[in-house]
Amino acid sequence: MSSSSNDRSAESFFGEVISAYTRAQAIEDGVLIDAGSMAQEAGFKWPVAVTSAAWADCVAWSEDDSDKQVHQDQSGRLWDVLFMASHAIRTRSGFGDRLLFELYRVPRDRRSTKAERTTLKLIVGPGDQGEPVITILLPHED
């Protein structure tokens, strides 16, 4: 294989980019939710965002939820997700850009009072400028 074939740009191979949706746009649109400084407190060195579906399932909690189910708060639920994700990274064996991890959370269904085990997925990938970022999502999401 000649070096000239390796020098071709992605654009010359795939064509002009028609549309791009950045991580910043996804956060602005609410598709991703930035975990903020709590991610650093949980031990993350890179920015962490949670998909809106994973947030709705494992983090979101209101006073109304506490009145109807069991008293919890959203920041405590976010801490649980981040702590378990951080723990999964620290204790994993092997390599790769993604991993599944488990945690217990009370389902937000207006009736449950006991925590149930659920699985989330963590992916390390490039941010908008190619920097490493982490996304936490439901197992079926990409």
Image (cartoon, rainbow, N blue to C red):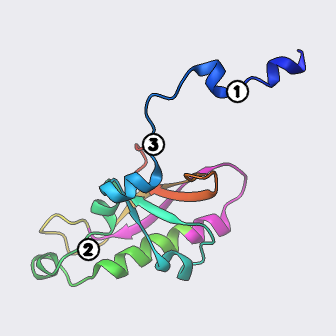
When the figure is inspected, residue 119 is found, relative to residue 13, above or below; the finding is: below
Residue 127, position in %: x, y?
Answer: 56, 53
Q: Position of residue 6 (x, y in %)?
A: 81, 23
Residue 130 in the image: state x and y as whole percent.
63, 51
Between the residue at mark 3 and the residue at mark 2, the CA separation in whole angstroms equals 29 Å
Specify the segment rendered in magenta. 86-106
What amino acid is labelled 1 in the image? Ser
> Quick one: 41 or 95, which is closer to the camera?
41
Task: Name the residue at 53% across, 24% down.
Answer: 16
Q: Are marks 3 and 1 in contact (CB under 8 Å)?
A: no
Q: Is residue 27 left or right of residue 82?
A: left
Q: Extreme right residue here?
A: 2
Q: The residue tagged with tag 3: helix, strand or loop?
A: loop
Q: Which residue is mark 1?
A: 9
Residue carrying label 2: 114
Give the crowd class for mark 2: few <14, some 14-19, many >=20 residues within 10 Å. few
Q: Quadrant of residue 141?
A: top left
User: Which label sits in the foreground, 1 or 2?
Assistant: 1
- For image coordinates 59% across by 21% down, the residue present is 14
**Residue type at tag 3:** Asp
**Gap in Å between the C-alphas at discs 1 and 2?**
54 Å
Give the mark count: 3
Which residue is found at the position 71% from the left and 58% from the top? Answer: 93
Residue plotted at (21% across, 84% down)? 71
Residue 142 - label? 3
